[in-house]
Amino acid sequence: MKKNPSRNIHLKKNPSKLLEKINNSIDTDHRLYKEDIEGSIAHAKMLGKQKIIFKKEELKIVNGLKSILKSITSGKITFKKELEDIHMNVESLLFKKIGKTAGKLHTARSRNDQVVTDFKLWIRNNSVSLDKQLQILQKNLIKVANKNTNTIMPGYTHLQVAQPISLAHHCLAYVEMLGRDRSRLLDCMKRLNENPLGSGALAGTSFPIDRNFTTKLLNFSRPTANALDSVSDRDFAVEFLFVLSLISTHLSRMAEEIILWSNQQFNFIILPDELATGSSIMPQKKNPDGAELVRGKASSVISNLNALLIILKGLPLAYSKDLQDDKKIVFSTFDDVYLTLGVMSEMWSKISFNNNIMAEAVNNSNATATDFANWLVQNLQLSFREAYHLTGKIVAYADENNKKLHQLKLTELQKFNKKINKEAKKTFSIEESIKNKKSFGGTSPQSVKQTIKNAIKKYL
């Protein structure tokens, strides 16, 4: 068996096969190899600068680590499970490469501060690609919005037709949700961006290290203020998972609407064939599997947030091995969210809309009832509550006579109030309803076009 350099000499027996199996994390944390080497290079340079190791030793270690990075990146390295994790694997490779000088790299450092530094670097690095995926989805939604400022569709509350809106207005709602997700991600990175390297096991170190130097090399904003806190908490990972959970929740809501819209009873959209599947026995079926899988992934993402919170809630300070699972949880969550963002981006870039059917869904409703009530307030000096009740009576009358509001004659309307005139009937126009919603953030083409301009400037 390959000797594990972290195995303490006072332990007389080798670990059992079961302990080796449960203790091994290389299958998960091998993804940290770049960050582990980056952190180790910064640490070695600091040790050399502070004359804790000789300059020639620093150069030997740094060059050895760079060579190992090339070998791993090119696929020449097979990690060893008996060495437990990526940190011990890299150290073992360094011993092979440069000999006993490799042993000096771990001076003034513990695996506790090493692993949390690597983990922070990984999350920070991958948050950049996550933000780009969010931006791509925003861009695709804005493209759809830009083409559909006059495309009419029902706006819903309680999944009941509420008021007419434009498809652009609907798309831009998700653009704003994703924009807040991006801002939360950025805010999370600001809090994460403190350097734990140099905290040691939990108490700091007696060596004359320079934490500001490694902070600068690793592009952190500042060193962490308390060594015990640095190695024992994972609030940065919890916050990252919370952001991922919100992103996934927004994607799930979006997916749910795509599933509904593709249903024959809605028929608002035609799904791209590439993101749908057929049935094993029903040849007519076109199933929205892409959207359903996006919706389904949200459950595991949210569960992972809860899992890490539960791990943390029972841990005393400082480090406990329970924290080894934090990376498995974060990595799998990131993978799911990154994948679903890509699926949803492709979905929005390829969906076709049945504009006539969406408009007809509005036309077959009484979605302009509020516009009529507003007219009563503005022209007959009724209070809104009086106008609301009067309009409700008219809607009930229309229902009883199997009509929609726009099908009622003026004489029928005047049975309820003689002051209602032909101008009031204009409020039943879907186009007029949308056109009149000119308030900032409203659904009028004028407002939506300005919102698109603002979104492009703000997000793209």
Image (spheres, rainbow, N blue to C red):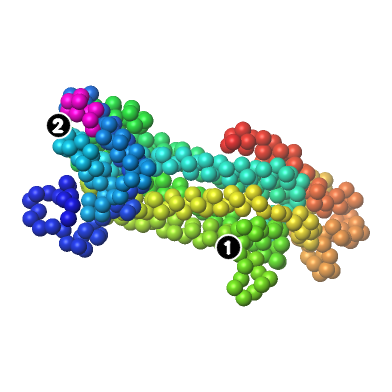
Q: Main secondary structure of the magenta part?
A: helix
Q: Is residue 4 above or below residue 192?
A: below
Residue at disc 2, secondary structure: loop
Judging by the rendered image, the residue that carries numbered circle 1 is: 289
Q: Residues within 10 Å of mark 1 (few under 14, many from 20)?
A: some
* Residue at 34% from the left image edge and 32% from the top image edge: 218
**Residue 325 image offset from top left, x and y in percent:** 31, 54
**How many marks overall?**
2
* Residue at 29% from the left image edge and 42% from the top image edge: 116
Was residue 59 drawn as part of the magenta stretch in this picture?
A: yes
- Of the 4 image quadrants, the one containing the N terminus is bottom left
Q: Is residue 377 left or right of residue 185?
A: right
- Tell me the magenta residue range: 53-61
Q: Residue furthest front?
A: 76
Labelled pair 2, 1 in contact (Cβ < 8 Å): no
Question: Looking at the image, which is closer to me, 279 or 428?
Answer: 279
Question: Looking at the image, which is closer to me, 320 or 58?
Answer: 58
Number of the front mark, 2 or 1:
1
Mark 2 or 1 closer to N-term? 2
* Residue at 23% from the left image edge and 23% from the top image edge: 49
Judging by the rendered image, the residue that carries numbered circle 2 is: 206
Residue 50's quadrant in the figure? top left
Was residue 5 drawn as part of the magenta stretch in this picture?
A: no
Question: Looking at the image, which is closer to me, 31 or 287?
Answer: 31
